Image (spheres, helix red, strand yellow):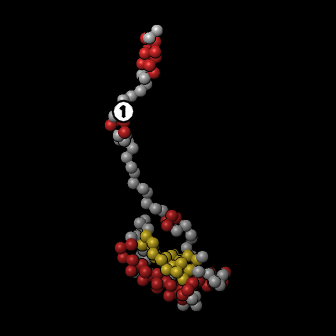
Amino acid sequence: MRLTPLLLALLAFTGCTLIDRRTFAPAPEAKAQAPAPPSAASIDPRTPLVTIEYSVPSPDYGELLNAAVRAAEGRDAQVQYDVIAVMKDTTDISSGMRRATEVMRAIMRNRVPESRIHLGVRSDPTLRAEQVRVYVR
């Protein structure tokens, strides 16, 4: 009779394992993976009114920008503009800000007050060439 509880206890512990360092060691296939680079949509989900790509030193964007600003002003006389320089990396922010400022001045030549134009710089590691994007809000 005394042997029965001992036998039951031994049978109950047959599924148990000894806890040691191997129990808490990570599996070799559980290595961390590098995060995917952000997509262009995650940088700014809005569709730009105008995208000026600087694959050439001085792109000719004047007529296109003037037509887009006139169309936007025709829809809403109080429209706000976000002029965003998008760069591959932000090591040379001054060139991005200079280009965004040039685009801002081109918008102001269409009689848009400076108070309705907002400047910014963002990075996108997937770019081939720097860009200035004009968004409306």
Q: 10 Å neighbourhood of mark 1: few (<14), some, or many (≥20)?
A: few
For badge 1, the amino acid type reads: Ile
Q: Is residue 74 left or right of residue 44?
A: right
Q: Looking at the rendering, which quadrant does residue 80 occupy?
A: bottom right
Residue depicted at x 35% and y 40%: 25
Residue lying farthest to the left in this orientation:
21
Q: Residue at x 37, y 36 (%)?
A: 23
Whether residue 89 appears in this view of the structure is: yes
Where does the image place residue 17, in percent across and percent down from the top left? 39, 28
Helix, strand or loop at mark 1: loop
Residue at the image position 56 percent from the left and 69 percent from the top: 46
Is 84 drawn above or below residue 126 in the view shown? below
**Residue 64 picture quarter:** bottom right
Q: On the image, numbered disc 1 is attached to which residue?
A: 19
Name the foreground residue: 7 vs 74: 7
* Residue at the far right in the pictured view: 75
Note whether 108 is above or below 134 in the view shown. Answer: below
Position of the C terminus, as image quadrant, is bottom right
